[in-house]
Amino acid sequence: MKTAGSEQNKLPQPLWLLAELTYSCPLQCPYCSNPVEMVNVKNELSTGDWIRVMREARAMGATQLGFSGGEPLVRKDLEILIAEARQLGYYTNLITSGVGMDEKRVEAFKKAGLDHIQVSFQASSEELNNFIAGTDAFQHKLEMARSVKKHGYPMVLCFVLHRKNEDQIRDILELAINLEADYVELATTQYYGWAFHNREQLIPTRQQLEHAEKVAKEYQDKMKGKMRIFYVIPDYFEDRPKRCMDGWGKIFLTITPDGTALPCHAARQLPGLEFPNVRDRSVEWIWNDSPDFNKFRGLDWMKEPCRSCPEKEKDLGGCRCQAYMLTGDARNADPVCDKSPHHKELVELVERVGSLAGTPEFEAKPLVFRSMKNSKKIMKEKSAATV
Amino acid sequence: MANPFSAEDIPVITPTFRLQWEQAQDCYVILYPEGMVKLSPSAGEIMKRCDGKTNITHMIDDLNNQFPGADLENDVYKFLEVAHENGWIRAK
């Protein structure tokens, strides 16, 4: 142990390993949390690399393993990785759109020891689902959700909520009941990656939120003991920030498709990070010793108003990425906090969207869908703007 | 007490949960989608006996043998009720 003494000084364990196996995805959801720069990420880790990463993280205490992406089903070695992960003692979660899955593969995953499958839906209606996903996936998703249940997995259904589907909340929950979901995640859009790019088209109105919260509560009561429903208020509408990732380098370790290790999946955009890679370094060094993972650990990095705030240990100043995106400095308070001098800009944004939402002109602005083509286009625009 | 179990019942871990010894935590844990609950030493001893073969009477005898001097019956029923409420176990 490096530092003896108090709990706070003890190095935390990476309990959660998120393996983003690929940025390839047959879907094009405009709120994807993958970086808009994804076209620049090449050279995916090999099967052997992933197995080494899983072993090293497990030796450090990691218990939960998420196979994510992009769409993890794109990886042909997924069955091998699942089998290895389970044998190492991980609880294995597959986080998928369902596209690229068939009954046979669901069965093969079970044989390999997969513990849980989370299937995402884009909406409760076929038309909107397929519009948001950018592909005709709805019927297949229904079929796959039924197959997941048939094979005895616990099933999480995930719906990302935003202005275009928020009013479907009742139908969404009825769909979840119909598909016998064990857990429903009503995941409010978080404005990172593509979602940040599209946020004006995605931010819900206050009325929509109030309605959604009421309906979610109604179903939480109604389904108690049968189906667990998670609903979180979007933080743009709050006045205290979320305790992001439960703290920087505290429990969460993301490995991106090219082997870059991040304390959260949105952190790639932060300036001043060195981006250690599992090809060059051990997970142990990355987690314990790398400058990146120590950068915002603890409380010493904070500026005012966080530094002297009595609530700093509770929310840890919120999200570093959000602070950077909205204020230009990752060490600032997350502007979701009403003690931040930038908070009023967020309030204005939410109010402006609220007053314009539904007007034909405002709604006519098209969503930019997540695709390699659009990623390339955005990169080009960015570099043109900086020349 | 509205306990869901009686002495002859055989509790078994629900297939959608997993019980596992975690070296790094130095305790038994319950694993489920994207989550983990750490168990106290006594809760761990009870959960590992929810093997689908042992009825509650035998479970209590076994625990009393292993930890002599403590009358564990009430604690066992109390914990089984909580575990049942959380969906971790059910009667076989």
Image: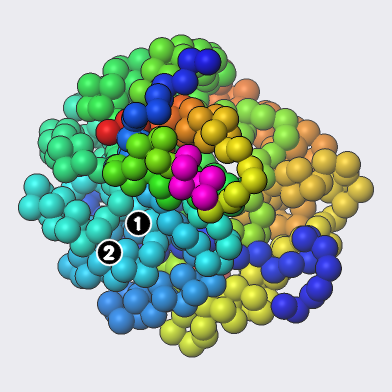
Residue plotted at (36% across, 15% down): A170
Tell me the kind of residue under disc 2. Answer: Ile
Q: Quadrant of residue B78?
A: top right
As measured in the structure, the alpha-carbon distance from the residue carrying label 1 to the one carrying label 2 is 7 Å
Q: Which residue is mark 2?
A: A82
In this orientation, which residue lies closer to the viewer: B19 or A193?
B19
Residue plotted at (47% across, 20% down): B3
Residue plotted at (79% across, 66% down): A9
In this orientation, which residue lies closer to the viewer: A77 or A212?
A77
In this orientation, which residue lies closer to the viewer: A139 or A57?
A57
Magenta-drawn stretch contains A220 = no
Image coordinates of residue A182 in percent, x first then y, are 33, 32
Find numbered disc 2 in the image and state the secondary structure of the residue it sits on: helix
Residue plotted at (51% across, 41% down): A190
Image coordinates of residue A327 in percent, x first then y, are 71, 50
Q: Earlier in the sequence, mark 1 or mark 2?
A: 2
Q: Which residues are magenta?
A: B60-65
Would you say B85 lies left or right of A88 here? right
- What is the chain letter for disc 2? A
Asked whether the residues under the numbered discs 1 and 2 touch, taking CB atoms below 8 Å apart as contact, a structural biologist would say yes
Image coordinates of residue A360 in percent, x first then y, are 39, 20
Most prominent secondary structure in the magenta stretch? helix
Residue A303 vertical position relative to residue A141 in the rendered view, above or below = below
Residue A118 vertical position relative to residue A362 in the rendered view, above or below = below
Tell me the kind of residue under disc 1. Answer: Thr
Q: Which residue is mark 1?
A: A92
